[in-house]
Amino acid sequence: MSIKYKFLIPAIALFLSECAFAGHFIVLLGPPGAGKGTLGKKLSEELNIPFVDSWRNYIVDKKSKQHIRDLKLVNRADYESVKNQILLKRLLQEDCANGVILDDWPKNEKDFSQINNYYFKNRPVTYIRLLADPDELLRRGLNRSVCTNLECGEIYGHQTPETEDQCDLCGAPLKTKDKDNEELFPKRIIAWENSWVETKSWLEERDFLLTDIDTHQRPDDVLQETLKVLKTSSDQ
């Protein structure tokens, strides 16, 4: 082998390893407090594909300053339709072309089919369910805070802000989420678990790859376990 080409071998190996996840589409599933946002951001940095928060309070109408959660209070059907349109528009942006990480969505045939027609286009989608016991979920939920700037909406759980009670991204004050209290948070966990029965059945019918990951470990360990799952699915 010519000496001038030897230096290319490590570079090619690195390139191939970085491409192992190219075009991979990941959906993180789990009840509130499972760590979807924390893992999604870490995966985004590691794989260089965007994390799209499906539950962020997106602006529906800039003129009236109406947000998606305002619509949810008025009409649930309109909320679901508008939410899907907003997320699809986000997925069709250039940075999502080579893959994306989604937060607890889509998880039924209606939502998936709409996105598949325009975005997934029958490319492989990996579903990962994050597990934690109810007491741990409650502990995490009661210790979360959220940015008060609706256009930002950053959530702090495992990750703490550099300046106490202030958002790292926009500098706005932080607050406890309205639904993150001892009365409502357990109900949110139960609601998710009830919906999981239908979601699991749909995933089995679709024959999607589904992997469970225990989050009773450090966030970086959860990340490494997830990367192993993605590498395995990419090799198949």
Image: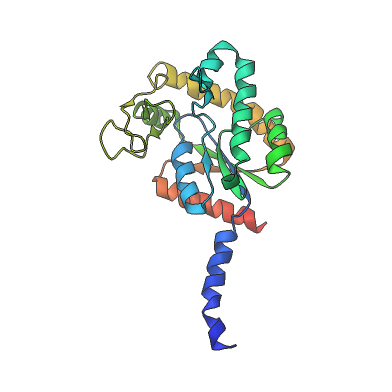
Q: Residue at x 32, y 29 (%)?
A: 172
Q: Is residue 78 above or below residue 37?
A: above
How is the model colour-coded? Answer: rainbow
**Residue 38 x %, y %:** 43, 40
**40 sits to left or right of 194:** left
Q: Is residue 75 above or below residue 93?
A: above
Quarter location, residue 110: top right
Q: Say which quadrant the C terminus sits in.
A: bottom right
- The single residue placed furthest to the front in the displayed view is 63
Task: Please count the marks in the image.
Answer: 0
Q: Is residue 196 above or below residue 158?
A: above
- The single residue placed furthest to the bottom in the displayed view is 2
Quarter location, residue 186: top left
Comparing 43 with 60, the one in front is 60
Q: Residue at x 56, y 33 (%)?
A: 104
**Residue 27 x %, y %:** 58, 40
Comparing 80 with 139, the one in front is 80
Q: Residue at x 64, y 58 (%)?
A: 235
- The single residue placed furthest to the top in the displayed view is 74
Quarter location, residue 80: top right
**Residue 195 x %, y %:** 60, 25
Q: Say which quadrant the N terminus sits in.
A: bottom right
**75 sits to left or right of 178:** right
**Residue 85 x %, y %:** 63, 28
- The single residue placed furthest to the left in the displayed view is 164
Comparing 159 with 31, the one in front is 159
